[in-house]
Structures are given as C-alpha cells and as structure tokens.
Amino acid sequence: MRFSKMFIPTLREVPADADAVSHRLMLRAGYVRQLAAGLYIFLPLGWRALDRINAILKEEMESISAQEISMPVLHPAEVWQQTGRWNTIGDEMFRLKDRTGRDMCLGMTHEEIITWLASREIRSYRDLPQIWYQIQTKLRDEARPKSGVLRTREFIMKDSYSFDADEESLDRSYQLHAGAYHKIFQRCGLKFHQVESDPGMMGGAVSHEFMAPSPAGEDEVALCDKCGYSANVELAQSVPLKIKSEDWEFEEVHTPEKRTVQEVSNFLKLSPAYFIKSILVITDKTPVLALVRGDQELHEKKLTKIIGSHRPAQKTEVKEILSVEAGFIGPMNQKIRIIADSCLREGVYISGANKQHYHAKGIKPEKDFKAEWHDIHLAKEGDACHKCGAKLRIEKCIEIGNIFKLGTKYSVPLKAFFLDENGQEKPIIMGSYGIGPARIAAAAIEQNNDKDGIVWPKSIAPFDVEILPLNMNDSKTVGVAEKLYNDLRGKDFEVLLDDRDERAGVKFKDADLIGIPTQIILGEKNLKEGFVEIKDRKTKETVKVKVEEVVERVKK
RNA sequence: CGGGGCGUAGCGCAGCCUGGUAGCGCGCCUGCUUUGGGAGCAGGAUGCCGGAGGUUCGAAUCCUCUCGCCCCGACCA
C-alpha cells in the first residue's frame, strides 16, 4: 500500500476525551474514529489490524474443527422468550418492533439463535459433537461505554458454540477451546492469564476468562505466583492474614460518637483487623446480618449466592430491627440469621455492643455468637492463597475472551434434543466461547507502546514493513524505494510505502506512531554507498544493510 | 441510574466572572525557500460559540430547559 493513497489521518495532539492509552493511540495514529458513545468507525489501518486478528482466530478455530457460519444480528423475540432471557435481561438489550408490530431485538449474543438451529438440525448422537462459530456484530446498550474500543455498544465478536452428547464430550470441547484460546492470544503477542470466573447471566456451572493485564482493564484478578491459582475477584477465594490473638476478657468500652471501624480503631488505637464489621442487609423475606473482619470488605456477589438478592438496610430499619443505632451493632444475642466470614472463626474481637456509644471488646466467636460461616470477603492484595498459603497478587486486566460450560440451559427450553445410542431422547450439552478482536487489538496496544506510539506485535500489525524514502525528490531514493516495495511484496510481506512528499521528521514521527514493526529508512547519503537502514520499532535498533540484502534481512 | 467535568474552526485551547457581535497554536489552501526526527517566510480559507427559550437596545458571555461527550460509581454473555 502507498501511504499517499491510504487514508491515515494521524493527529499531532491528543484528543481531549481519550483517557486510556490504547484509545489515545488508536485515535492519534488514525486507526479509529468515534461516531457516538460506544460506537466506533474502524479506519483502514484499524480494520487491517482486526483482519489479521480475525485471520488468526479463524486458523485456530479451524484447527479444532470449528465451522464458520453467520447468523443474523436481528432476532425475533420468541426465541429469547423461550429461554426467559427476554425478561431477565433488562435495558442492555436493544429492542424494537418490525412493521407488523412483532417484537424483535438486536443480538447481544447468539446462544438462542444457534440453539434454535441445533434444535431443528441435530437429531442423532451421530450428528455430535459439533462446534459452530461466527465472527460477527453484537449489540448491547451498555450503561457506560468507556475506554475507547474496550467497552462499546456495538462490537465484533468471535463466538463459538459446542454441542455434545454428554459431559465428558463437553469437557473435550471445552478443553479444545481453552487450548485454541491460549494459542490465539500467544500468537497475538499478548500477556494473559486464564482465570476462574463467574458465569453470570450466561448460566452454567463452569467458566473461565482470559485476562490481559493492563491498567485500562475493568476487571481485577487474584493471582498466586506459587501454585498458579487465578480467579476473577468476583469469586476469588482468599485467606486474610492471621492476626495475633489478644487475650481480652469481655468488657464494654465507652466509644462516644465513634461509629465506623476506622473511627473506633483510631480511638482505641487497635488495628481494624481486631474488629468485626456488622452489616445489616434486607432480603425479600428477612433481614440478615453479615459479618466481615474490620480490615476486609464485604463481597456482595458472594453474599448473594448464599442469601439471594438483598439490599443494605436503611438507618431506620437498623433501629427497628436491631433496636440500636447503626454504628453500634454487634453479633451478640441476635435473633436474626447471621452469615460470617470464615476468617472470623478464630480470634477475639471488638464489635458494636448493641448499645448506644458502646463497643464490646473480647468477643469470642461460637461462644458469644453463632453464625453460618462462609467466604464472603473481597480478596485483596496480600491475602493468602486459600490453596497454598502464598501471598496473592491483584492485577487489573482486560477481559479478552471467555469460555462457558452451559450444559442444558438453552437446549432444554429450546427443545434441542437428540436420540442417543439407545434411542433415548436427551438434551444436547452445550458450551459457549467468545473472543473480542477489538479488545485484543486494544490490549496489544496497552501492553506494547512507548512515548512515540504503538509497537505492534508482528503477528497483528496492519503491515509488516514500512519503507521511508526520506527525500522523494531524489530519483535514486525513489527508485530504490519502488524496487524494495515490489521485491518485499513479492515475498509476501505486507508493505506500506511512505511515498508522501513530506519532510523526514514527519515520516519518522508518523511511522513510530502507527507502529509498523520494521522500518526501512532510505537516506540519500547511505544510498550513495549502497546502504539502507533497517530499524526495529520495538528496540529502536538500526542496522545498515546493503540494498541487495534487504529482502533476506527483513524477518516476518 | 447517582456523582463530577466539559461542549467556541478539522484538532488542542483562550475569551465567559465584569454583556458591546470571536481569537491563539497546530492542521488545511497558494507561492518561494528548505529537506535525517512533526521546517521558515509571505499570503489565504474556515465558526448555527451543542440546541431551544428567556432577560437585555445588544448574549459565546446572564437565567431556564434540553441534547451530547468524558470521568468515578452502580451495572455489565
């Protein structure tokens, strides 16, 4: 491609409302433009990068015998009603009516559609297993699109779905995907972790996420470097560090106007880890008292799994139910259900005394109160790994892919059944697997950039090589540039020739910004002696090479 | 949906407080010079000052409403 013929609108100044590094660089380097919140146009360079990512996706999917298909973006409501998601999914789904008034929606994912297909086409165990995939548009009316291309309302996704006759077979399909995903992200040059994750609205029992470490990420992942435990903090288990147990006798301490753990902890000059945080929540039936250690945070999702959906109690409710003002609640002598974090089982603690302006010191769990013990705290940096005891690390990550074991969640309501060897009708066992190509691109930029611009991994750069003839008025320079351009293309390199009549500085700046891995610099003086320079964008190392040797020296 | 910020030329911004009819830098166009890290000089084009309503002789500026975008949170296969 010739730079002069390609639309690459680079920007000198950083657009004001871009915050994430990848967003800034994609805008500045002319890869994308924003249409509206969460809606992006991919310009020629951006689209090329996505194309290369998609090519890798296709190769690796084909290698596990997945077959590419294409499903509509526009869906009739009926299939979504049959699985119940028409109602369980809220404003995130774009809904509309067609001209006859029929309810429709825009696809935010395709379990319903592909299961509809399977229900009509798969009849026998002989038809199984199958893996079908597509690379296609998804639409979600996100509450808050953000960080450029990382969270958008319309995006392309590689989604695949597996259909198996039994659990063992599903496990094979699942592992095939996990393996393919590892290869994909490796080939795309990303640092990533595979972590345990919460299946969320997808349903199903087992799921993993592929997470690319980056400060722009929205997720936090707990990692153990020793045993390899890794999980999204949405469900990560951990053991808070033990504290030295004090041998306090039970006593009530006057703590006037000291309500929060922090206030009382400062007042008594004792670490927050000696306190029990008591939080009253209301489920649709009853109030529940949740207890976590003072230096820990209550994990809402973990609690939800135990008691169902709930909300924090209002101040007046606390007074009504517990007969004491918020801030002085304690677990002793309570009639209501108590869920306590497991780490509180040992030790002696301080908590509210259920008496205005008093806290109780020397509380012994099991003796002074009974509770149901569960892990309900948020894992944090420095907690111990619940498997091996080593210290956990928390890392911010971009979710670049995920895999779910769905089981029969979709096949049963949509009647996707098959006949097994014995003529028995059984629901197909399904899995669902997604990758966001734009997130791969953004994560690659987040992980590979410097002050001058993007540093693309070779595998997904929009071009392999950029040729920079510094003086377009010099016929020798132009001649050599054209020859190298043709020779390299003849060897299957994707080549960008900066044939613009621009000054050297402009070409250097633009080349570094758009981040093509290899630059070939043609300067007049070097050319007189028969040399050109080959520069590595990543290391900035430059080697002088004879013109005739360029093609063999350039590496993919 | 709650909290905060911002909408003025293609991009980045000033002007607004204290009302008088819009400016800077970059980019863009023309010419000459220049040519290894975003050139210099000279000339030139470009604005529904986000939108609507109000106050006023007069509104980018003051008031009300509204729309959009960004950030934090809630939410998020």
Image (cartoon, rainbow, N blue to C red):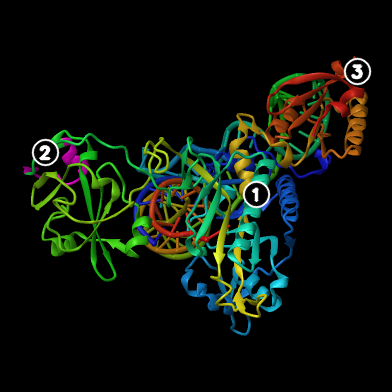
Indicate whether residue A256 is drawn in magenta: yes
Q: Chain of mark 1?
A: A
Circle 3 packing at 10 Å, graded few (<14), some (14-19), many (20+), is some
Q: Which residue is identified by label 1?
A: A179
Q: Which residue is identified by label 3?
A: A530
- The reply to whether dot 1 and dot 3 touch (C-beta < 8 Å) is no
Give the side of residue A371 with respect to residue A200, left or right: left
Q: Residue at x 69, y 61 (%)?
A: A133
Which marked residue is nearer to the observer: mark 1 or mark 3? 1
Dot 2 amino acid type: Trp
> Which label's residue is closer to the chain start, 2 or 1?
1
* CA separation in Å, label 1 and label 3: 48 Å
Which marked residue is nearer to the observer: mark 2 or mark 3? 2
Residue range in magenta is A252-266
Give coordinates of residue A60: x percent, y percent: 72, 51
> Which label's residue is closer to the chain start, 1 or 3?
1
Give the side of residue A505 with respect to residue A141, left or right: right
Give the side of residue A349 with respect to residue B48, left or right: left
Q: Chain of mark 3?
A: A
